[in-house]
Image (cartoon, helix red, strand yellow):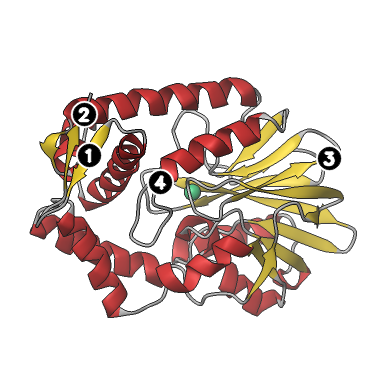
Amino acid sequence: MTLIHPITQDIFQVRIPVPFPLKYVNCYLFRENNGWTLLDTGLHDEPGLNAWMHVFDVLQISPRDIRRIILTHTHPDHFGLAGYFQNLSNAPVYALDREIETVPVIWRDDAAHVEALSAFFAQHGVPSRVVANIQERSRQLIRWTHPLPQFTPLHENDTVLVGEHHYRVVWTPGHADGHAVLQSANDGLLLAGDMILAKITPNIGLWPQSDPNPLKSYLASLEKVDALHARTALTGHRAVIENVAARIQELRVHHAERAHACWNAARECSAYEIALKTFERLENAEDVRMAVVETLAHLEFLVGEGRAERLEGGVTRYRRTG
Ligand SMILES: [Zn+2]
């Protein structure tokens, strides 16, 4: 499969393989007078690195030509290679200030942190054998993000040069607490990261130490992005989105439907039990991990709306109201 897809003469979408069901993360290269800007990186594993070496070869880029690395958010598939590339290029690595704060919390390589994550899944009803697999997965994900880069913070409404154009930084929490999109003033382009995706929906998850109501934040971010009136969104996975407004409307409907399904299933059940009832297939620990945090985001949204209550105990349960 071809890795490099030209968007314009000077913007290239680069598909880097990731060992997730998503298969690829879309990263972007922006040509400048004397170098390149890199948007998102893929994670730090051998297939990812090999893919980049091939891309650099084809476009005749030396890692020293990377002038800056910009990250939409710090999930492993988007930032795992940032530190590695920074070591090769000395380029600054930019992310939103709020997102940078989360990195030492979420991606530090320490046993206590992974234990706390496992306790969180057990608290929400996940069986211990699955928790053990999730724990192993968490350790692997952390390894794929190292070495961590030295960050340079971006702030909301900053203007940054990306390739030949200036983009405005817009904070869009939900998928990640400090997720940012970049809006071009010139040509209606939106560098969307995982804020909106075609065909699939970005995972909106409640994690320990994350935003306590990420779905509420995400729905507000959808409104914010809608108001930007972008023409084309360059996304972090799957296809480029040409009709941004229509896709935003579909995402609103999706979350309303999923919230309703969670409400319907919440009859003094754990988030794990509700995930089993509302997701079509949960085949492995990774499926369970993502489904449980997504279900929790919807349940906590319902709690916030007064449509469900959280029952604390050995295992946290949710009960619908109204
Ligand atoms: Zn992603």
Q: Quadrant of residue 216?
A: top left
Question: Foreground residue, 29 or 146?
Answer: 146
Q: Is residue 73 above or below residue 223?
A: below
Q: Quadrant of the C terminus?
A: top left
The reply, left or right, for residue 185 in relation to residue 294 is: right
CA gap between label 3 and label 1 equals 44 Å
Residue behind mark 4? 213
Image check: 131 left or right of 55? left
Name the residue at 53% across, 21% down: 249
Precedes in sequence: disc 3 or disc 1: 3
**Secondary structure beneath disc 4?**
loop
Q: Is 240 left or right of 272, judged from the image as shown?
A: right
Q: CA separation, marks 4 and 1?
A: 14 Å
User: Quick one: SS at disc 1?
Assistant: strand
Between 44 and 202, the residue placed more toward the observer is: 202
Q: Which residue is mark 3?
A: 185
Could you tell me the amino acid type at mark 1?
A: Glu
Label 1 close to label 2 by CB (< 8 Å): yes
Specify the label residue 321 is tagged with: 2
Which residue in the structure is indicated by mark 1? 309
Give how far apart the Cα atoms at labels 1 and 2 are. Answer: 7 Å
- Which residue type carries mark 3? Ala
Can residue 107 be seen here? The reply is no
Q: Position of residue 209 (x, y in %)?
A: 38, 62
Q: Mark 4 belongs to which amino acid?
A: Asn
Q: Is there a contact, CB below 8 Å, between mark 3 and mark 2?
A: no
Label 3 residue SS: loop
Amino acid type at circle 2 is Thr
